[in-house]
Image: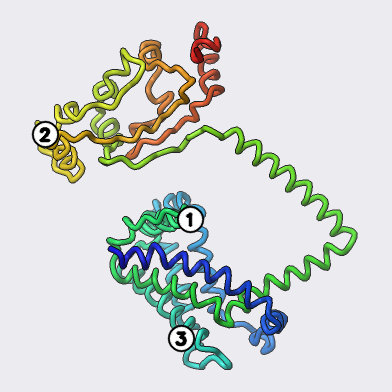
Amino acid sequence: MMRDFLLFGVAPYLAAALLVCVPAWRFRSPRGKAALAARPADARRGGAPLWPWSLGLVLLGHAVAFLLPRSLLLWDRVPARLLMLEAGAFVLGFVALDGLVRLAREGLPGGSAADVLLLALAVLAVGSGLAMAAFYRWGSEWYGLSLLPWFRSLLALRPDLSEIVPLPPLVKLHLLSGIAAVAVLPFSQAVFAAVRPVVGLGRLGAAFLGSAPGRWAAAGVELALVALLGGLLIGGLRRVGVSQGYAPPQPIAFSHRLHAGTYRVACLYCHFAAEKSRHAGIPPAGVCLNCHGQLKVASAELERLKEAVAQARPVRWRKVHNLPDFVYFNHGQHVHAGVACQRCHGPVETMDRVRQASPLTMGWCLDCHRTRAVAAGQDCGKCHY
């Protein structure tokens, strides 16, 4: 729906643009510079409340899960660790909500309308997060499976709402309140409190760099950065034309894990041309119906296949493993030589969506030829003619 696209496909970009542009404009003004130089009110009173640390830890946990999604899912596989993570996050969220509510009751001295709105959105975001933890358990599990793919699709500039639209209204409220808080933050005084520690560290760093040890340290860092950039550049150039990890979505979600893994269907039953042809080929729909025409299996994907067959409409599968036009590769030669399909295509029996597991570069092929002592396996004319 257009509403979902505007809320979850457009609004995040608008919030991010405001978060970058508005503070940059405010910090350059004389009032903004004075606000950055001022000491926070809590520091003048000699103490800081606990709830900002709790809120910061909750946000840090979200960021760590975003950067390390596989580690999150591996951690959650052990019930005791999953329970510990959920309980710890709930306690931190409760402490943060209590502090925000207390702050709202006490009032914001000198606070603007943006500060009041930001506080209300923060209460709504944290409160809805706690409600989610109460009504929809094991949120860290579906956070890694549903929300992180959406976040990553936003970073790739290709918003994918397929995992967001089916979520319960409470989860959507949590997301929208967070997006709205990010959009309001640049207009509030809280943005100065968030940036002030960074400015202080920058001043300490500038003072250190002005000393002799600091200059030596800066020179070492510059050399390290040059070496790092050089390594990244060389590595990037070596990856040109390499599509390792490529896993395009298919018009029908065929699962190799189910067919080749669970039911142990032989690779050559479907890709029968691989034994005697240069190309392995994509099996025609009739091969699928050899089994599914007799088995009473119902699924939406199977119905799509049957509909395409009934309409004599070809299924436009997307090729995953592509070699350059100047490379000759023959499947039949390799199959008869005893090379297993997994040697080049990876453990397809574990893949729901097939991906290019190997780099398929010339060096990778030559390493295999050397290991297997293939006759004329290192002759250029064997693959390039």
Q: Are marks 1 and 2 in contact (CB under 8 Å)?
A: no
Image coordinates of residue 156 in percent, x first then y, are: 47, 52
CA gap, disc 1 and disc 2: 42 Å
Residue furthest out toward the right: 212
Q: Residues within 10 Å of mark 2 (few under 14, many from 20)?
A: few
Residue carrying label 1? 155
Q: Nearer the viewer, residue 110 or 349?
A: 110
Color style of the picture: rainbow
> Judging from the image, what secondary structure is the residue with disc 3 in?
helix
* In the rendered image, the vertical position of residue 168 relative to residue 246, given as above or below: below
Looking at the rendering, in which quadrant would you find the N terminus? Answer: bottom left
Of callouts 3 and 2, which one flags the residue occurring earlier in the amino acid sequence? 3
Packing grade of label 3 (10 A; few <14, some 14-19, many >=20) is some
Q: Type of residue at label 1?
A: Leu
Q: Is residue 318 above or below residue 377?
A: below
Task: Please name the amino acid that badge 3 sits on.
Answer: Val
Give how far across and how far down residue 127 sits, in percent.
39, 77
